[in-house]
């Protein structure tokens, strides 16, 4: 019985083993499906949370970046720029000047007396040697008569001394007179000769003074002043300030002294042509020539003084007239023009602000001519530079700047 039971159980176990195996295999597969779904759900939740966090962080970073950019843009000044106007090679410079007479001199009296007569008034054109006026000199006339009388006396004494000396020199040979007496006679002759020479010199001096009674024109010119009249007392040299009788000017040629800026000094060459224009003669040009320079730069004005001579045969140009002198300059001298508002006056000197690579750059410049609203820059700028208009006083090199959209493309554009 026992063995039968054991056999039956063994058969039952063998029969039930596939069923248990199938059940054992079936139960884990059914349990794994909910776990996978749960894992997928958790992964999706994690991804959603991560995406939300990422998007949030990204939006905050983008907002901070936009805020930073906006702050930087607000802090970066917006400037208007222009491009310097390139000028053609400068052909000439125009400088102010004033005409002067080629010879300009006052005429004084050299002798004392009274004005007897004058012959020419202001504006009169006179030739060299023409008589301008006469002076009465009664004192000089009397002194001259006395001097001539003294000279005649000295001449008579000289003749007597000469005769005596000759006689004594003849007698001393025969021993009729002593040697001492002969030497005394010869010495007396020498003294009389000296006295006669002195009297003659005094006569010549007074004759020269008397010749100054007549005042003659020293050169061809125009009488520009007459400061005396008939009967005036002429006191020549007796006072510290002698009286000027006439003033004459030679205007057949005129001189014009012009201060040339240092930057154009090399163009001021002796022999160069120079044209003159005047407001009172519009459209008319007077030809001149640069004849000399001072060969020295004036330290106070930084200019070179030059003299231009111009012929004036018709007398149209008058001394003292304000003229414009046109001087030729070398073809190599090139420049650009910018508005005056672009200049910066700093301790380092005259500067201009440029925009380079989004930053301000202050460069030194040198001015040629000042036209008022614009200035000529002869060094420091090129036509391709972006020049800042109306720069702030606080502008420094290296500061970031932004170029405005309405910047001009050139001077006056």
Image: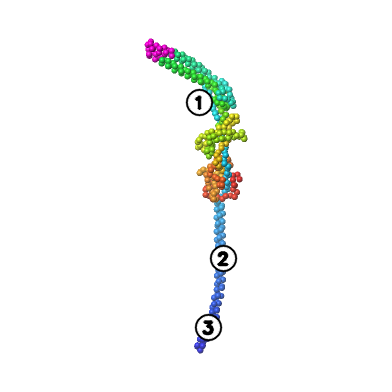
65, 103: nearer the viewer: 103
Dominant secondary structure, magenta:
helix
- Disc ID at residue 240: 1
Residues tagged 1 and 3 counted as in contact (Cβ below 8 A): no
**Residue under pointer 2:** 48
User: Please, is residue 312 above or below residue 78 in the view?
Assistant: above
For the residue carrying disc 2, how many other residues have a C-alpha within 10 Å: few (<14), some (14-19), or many (20+)?
few
Q: Position of residue 176 (x, y in %)?
A: 38, 10
- Residue situated furthest bottom in the rendering: 1
Q: Is residue 404 magenta?
A: no
User: Please, is residue 351 above or below residue 273 in the view?
Assistant: below
Residues tagged 1 and 2 counted as in contact (Cβ below 8 A): no
Q: Quadrant of residue 310?
A: top right
- Residue situated furthest top in the rendering: 176
For the residue carrying disc 3, how many other residues have a C-alpha within 10 Å: few (<14), some (14-19), or many (20+)?
few
- Determine the secondary structure under disc 3: helix
């Amino acid at each position: 019985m026992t063995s039968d039971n054991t056999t039956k159980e063994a058969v039952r176990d063998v029969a039930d083993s596939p069923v248990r195996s199938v059940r054992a295999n079936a139960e884990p597969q059914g349990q794994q499906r909910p776990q996978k779904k749960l894992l997928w759900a958790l992964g999706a939740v994690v991804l959603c949370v991560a995406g939300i966090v990422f998007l949030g962080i990204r939006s905050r970073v983008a907002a901070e970046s936009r805020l930073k950019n906006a702050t930087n843009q607000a802090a970066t000044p917006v400037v208007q720029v222009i491009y310097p106007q390139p000028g053609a090679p400068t052909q000439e410079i125009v400088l102010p000047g004033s005409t002067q007479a080629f010879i300009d001199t006052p005429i004084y009296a050299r002798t004392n007396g009274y004005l007897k007569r004058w012959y020419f008034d202001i504006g009169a054109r006179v030739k060299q040697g023409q008589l301008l006026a006469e002076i009465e000199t009664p004192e000089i006339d009397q002194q001259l008569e006395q001097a001539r009388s003294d000279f005649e006396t000295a001449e008579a004494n000289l003749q007597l001394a000469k005769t005596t000396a000759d006689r004594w020199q003849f007698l001393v040979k025969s021993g009729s007179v002593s040697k001492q007496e002969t030497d005394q006679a010869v010495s007396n002759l020498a003294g009389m000769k000296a006295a006669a020479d002195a009297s003659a010199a005094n006569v010549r001096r007074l004759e020269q003074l008397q010749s100054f009674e007549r005042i003659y024109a020293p050169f061809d010119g125009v009488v520009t002043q007459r400061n005396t009249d008939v009967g005036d007392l002429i006191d020549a040299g007796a006072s510290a300030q002698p009286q000027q009788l006439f003033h004459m000017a030679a205007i057949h040629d005129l001189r014009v002294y012009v201060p040339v800026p240092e930057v154009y000094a090399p163009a001021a060459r002796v022999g160069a042509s120079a044209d003159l224009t005047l407001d009172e003669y519009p459209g008319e040009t007077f030809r001149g020539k640069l004849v000399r320079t001072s060969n020295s730069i004036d330290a106070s004005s930084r200019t070179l003084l030059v003299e231009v001579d111009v012929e004036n045969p018709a007398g149209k140009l008058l001394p003292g007239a304000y003229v414009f002198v046109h001087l030729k300059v070398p073809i190599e001298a090139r420049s650009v023009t910018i508005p005056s508002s672009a200049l910066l006056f700093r301790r380092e000197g005259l500067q201009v602000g440029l925009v380079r690579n989004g930053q301000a750059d202050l460069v030194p410049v040198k001015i040629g001519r000042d036209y008022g609203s614009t200035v000529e820059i002869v060094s420091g700028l090129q036509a391709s530079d972006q020049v800042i208009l109306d720069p702030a006083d606080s502008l420094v090199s290296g500061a970031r700047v932004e170029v405005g959209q309405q910047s001009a493309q050139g001077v006056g554009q």
